[in-house]
Amino acid sequence: MTALPADVALLVIDLQPDFMPGGALACEQGDALVAPITALLAERRYRTVVATQDWHPADHASFASQHPGHLPFEAILLHAQPQTLWPDHCVQGSAGAALHPGVDWTVADLILRKGTRQQVDSYSAFRENHGPDGTRPATGLAGWLHERGIREVHVCGLARDYCVLWSAQDAVKSGFRVKFLWELTRPVTDANDGMVREALAKARIAIL
């Protein structure tokens, strides 16, 4: 396969067992991404590869278990912003939080852990969700990519309707051209696919 230009990077979002069948927050057929993403990485078409890893403390504020009387997938306000409550997932050091062991991650130039702050959720690879001060703090990924001369990013992984979508949107806001590798993503909820396509079109993000 022909190598892509040096200014194109691949972002593999949260390819972790907890987001796959049998995991704490499973995306249907999430495990079906392991083989094709492994094959894509093995082709070495991308000279820069970033993998993100959801990495929550056990008492993370996005967990329904931390909000008595609430159930997973209910919505509340957290720091005056809508927050979906999740089952406990990707707890630091757990097997479900590991990057999937079936993938050769040695090709990754950077592994970015996110969602590490107890009071702040973090869907996007580029910015955390709103925190107590009302801002969305940067993760530093945009600066890292810019300093490496990256101008375009391709995104894949889990989940299509949350972390991959938010990463793609924030990549545009950070000044990158963005392509969304649709077949290399899976959603938490299939019913959100229409919303995702509309959001990508609004942001002028190409779907491959």
Image: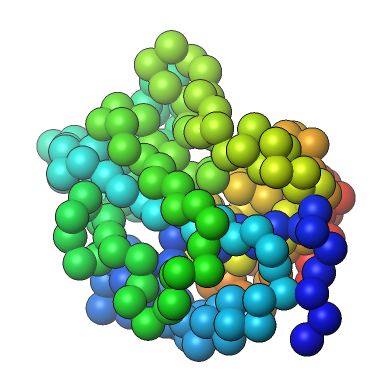
Residue at 80% over, 53% down? 7
Q: Is residue 123 visible?
A: yes
Residue in the picture at 38% in, 16% down = 132
Q: In this view of the protein, can residue 172 be seen by the observer?
A: no
Q: Is residue 188 left or right of residue 115?
A: right
Q: Quadrant of the N terminus?
A: bottom right
Residue under the image location 70 percent in, 67 percent down: 46
| Quarter-of-image position of residue 40 | bottom right
Which residue is at a point 72% across and 74% down the rendered structure image? 45
Q: How is the image coloured?
A: rainbow
Q: Nearer the viewer, residue 108 or 30?
A: 108
Q: Position of residue 56 (x, y in %)?
A: 27, 45
Q: Is residue 134 left or right of residue 97?
A: right
The location of residue 54, given as percent across then percent down, is: 37, 51
Residue 174 pos. (x, y %): 72, 34
Q: Nearer the viewer, residue 88 or 98?
A: 98
Corner quadrant of residue 37: bottom right
The quadrant of the rendering that contains the C terminus is bottom right
Vertical side of 193 occupied by 199: above or below: above
Residue 135's place in the image compared with 104, above or below, is above
The answer to which image quadrant residue 203 occupies is: top right
